[in-house]
Image (spheres, rainbow, N blue to C red):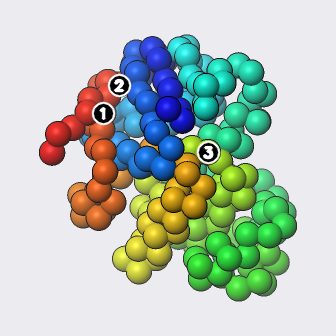
Amino acid sequence: MLLQIQQLHTPQVGPLDLALGAGELAQVAGPSGAGKSLLLRAIADLDRNEGLIRLEGQPRQALSGSDWRRRVGYLPADPAWWADTVGEHLQPGGEHWLEALGFGPDVRTWTVDRLSSGERQRLALVRVLQNRPRVLLLDEPTANLDPDNTLIMEGLIRDYLRDSDAAALWVSHDAEQRSRLGGRLLLMESGQLMESNG
Ligand SMILES: Nc1ncnc2c1ncn2[C@@H]1O[C@H](COP(=O)(O)OP(=O)(O)OP(=O)(O)O)[C@@H](O)[C@H]1O
């Protein structure tokens, strides 16, 4: 197993177990307020949580918080930006991702305050992918995108999972997207995670 979670719990989430294999995409659905975002934040170790999480057999405590979050990349629904320009948030390289998402090389000079919500969402994905994570934690990554960009982003993420043999936990409210992506579906309700059969 690539990612193994045992008895993960926070005041709002769990205790729950979950395992993701290399290349696996598991979707998480469930009502607003069920704890989907808090689950992703707990796995990324951004909120206080207890439980055992292993990545490729290595316990989370063996890595620093920042190393863990490079390997287990979290894309929040509303990513934070701290510097003035896009380029200050990006590492060198990754031009193929920028290009695939519709940006030219000049995007690095753009100021963050001019970005639309969809541009923010697409650029934040590039930020996460540049760390070459083994696991992606995606919180409604296409919520602010038009249909064309949604399909492009879905394709890019799928390509990354296939090429890097990475896994993803993908929160989506969109039933059509869920059927396009396919794969395993997990349902979250009141902080508990259940495997869905349909
Ligand atoms: N820091 C916090 N302390 C206490 N409760 C919180 C905290 N953050 C979120 N909550 C509550 O925990 C519950 C789960 O929140 P969460 O953001 O995980 O929901 P969600 O399933 O992602 O919902 P949505 O689909 O609307 O994004 C909500 O009732 C929320 O108000």
Dot 2 or dot 3, earlier in sequence: 3
Cα–Cα span, label 2 and label 3: 25 Å
Dot 1 alpha-carbon crowd within 10 angstroms: few under 14, some 14 to 19, many 20 or more: many
Image coordinates for residue 187, horizontal then vertical, percent: 27, 36
Q: Secondary structure at mark 1?
A: strand
Q: Is residue 11 above or below residue 183?
A: above
Residue of label 1:
188
Amino acid, disc 3: Arg
Camera-near label (3 vs 1) is 3
Is label 1's Cβ within 8 Å of ligand 1? yes
Circle number at residue 171:
none
Residue of label 3:
134
Image coordinates for residue 174, horizontal then vertical, percent: 29, 58
Q: Residue at x 17, y 39 (%)?
A: 197
Q: Residue at x 35, y 25 (%)?
A: 191
Q: Is residue 79 above or below residue 188?
A: below
Residue of label 2:
191
Looking at the rendered image, the quarter that the C terminus falls into is: top left
Observer able to see residue 38? no
Q: Secondary structure at mark 2?
A: loop
Observer able to see residue 40? yes
